[in-house]
Amino acid sequence: MLTYVHQFIGALTFSVFVESIVVVFLCVFLKKDKRLSLLAVLGTLLTIPYVWFVFPTLFWYSASLALYLGEGSYFLFEAMLYKILGKFNWKQALFFSFLATLASYFLGRSF
């Protein structure tokens, strides 16, 4: 279990870093306040523990199901943060969340 916790801490740190960078680039490109990258940090800190610890427990019989439901929930929760706290419209919120989550997921799988 301790190894799993160490892997979790590494994944959490990596996700915070990658998603923040993606959101900063999007903010620069779309002329938004770069401080919105803090929403990526908040979203990651609030949801990654569920993706790593809760969903695998709930869906112990299917790792794939746990992963896809966890990532999907994470994506939607993060989009809601952008919508509510970032004052984005739904299209922008979903776009930011999608790109940040996608980058984190695929870059994380490559390491």
Image (tube, grey):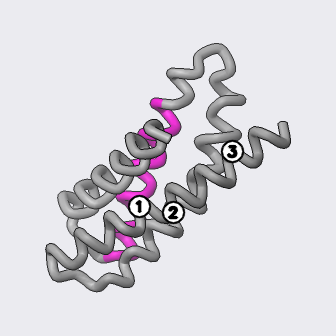
Please state the total of marks drawn on the protein image. Answer: 3
Amino acid type at mark 1: Glu
Q: Earlier in the sequence, mark 3 or mark 1?
A: 3
Q: Residue 1, percent across and down?
A: 84, 36
Residue carrying label 2:
16
For the point 42% across and 39% down, the residue is 72
- Neighbor class of circle 1 (other Cα within 10 Å; few <14, some 14-19, many 20+) is many
- On residue 19, the disc is 1
Callout 3 secondary element: helix
Q: Earlier in the sequence, mark 2 or mark 3?
A: 3
Instruction: Tell me which segment is drawn in magenta.
Output: 68-86
Residue 74 magenta-drawn? yes
Q: Could you classify mark 2 by the number of other residues whose Cα lies within 10 Å: few (under 14), some (14-19), or many (20 or more)?
A: many
Q: CA distance from mark 2 to mark 1?
A: 5 Å
Magenta span includes 3: no
The mark closer to the camera, 3 or 1, is: 3
Under circle 2, the secondary element is: helix
Query: Which amino acid type is shown beneath numbered disc 3?
Result: Gln
The amino acid type found where label 2 is placed reads: Val
Give left or right: position of 67 versus 99: right
Marks 2/1 in contact by CB < 8 Å: the verdict is: yes
Q: Which mark is residue 7?
A: 3
Q: Position of residue 13 (x, y in %)?
A: 59, 60
